[in-house]
Image (cartoon, grey):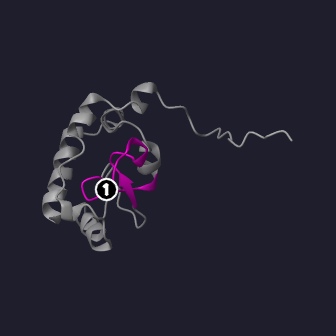
Amino acid sequence: MKRRNTKTYHPKRRRLPRHLVRVSSRVQQDFPLPVPGHLKILTKQRWAAILDFWGQRCAYCGTGLDILTKDHVVSKRRHGETHVGNIVPACPWCNEDKAHCDLHAWMEERGHNYEAFLAKLKRQIEVIE
């Protein structure tokens, strides 16, 4: 019996430029952020504290929605872990658009300030600790 191709074609999904798919050396040196051992587990209370820290808004675009998703700053595909230093609230659009892209290149392409985001992410760890 002939095997069928199980991959489906999504016409709306565009192919990402190579510079967004590779992890830049800048992101490799910035991550992983040092996270104390007791913050490695993401609980419901810590997720609520993260939402409060970001003001119930998307960490990337600042949109305030009722539906915010947990976004891995360094994606699971790139071996990012699920802990306080790697999870931020994101609107569904930013979460899907960023996907597994290189964070620095993605933020630069969108006109976001990478250094300010990284500083706020470090403050998030301190506040929740």
* Residue that protrudes farthest toward the top in the picture: 18
SS assignment at label 1: strand
When asked about the image quadrant of residue 40, the answer is: bottom left
Task: Specify start and end residues of the magenta stretch as a single range.
Answer: 69-92
82 and 107: which one is in front? 82
Q: Residue at point 35% right, 61% down?
A: 64
Mark 1: few/some/many CA within 10 Å (<14, 14-19, 20+): many
Q: Residue at point 49% right, 31% down?
A: 16
The three-letter code of the residue at mark 1 reads Ile
State the residue position of label 1.
87
* Residue that protrudes farthest toward the right in the picture: 1
69 lies above or below 106 = below
Please check the rendered image and state whether residue 32 is part of the magenta-colored stretch, yes or no. no
**Where's the N terminus, which quadrant?**
top right
68 and 20: which one is in front? 20
Q: Position of residue 118 (x, y in %)?
A: 20, 45
49 lies above or below 10 = below
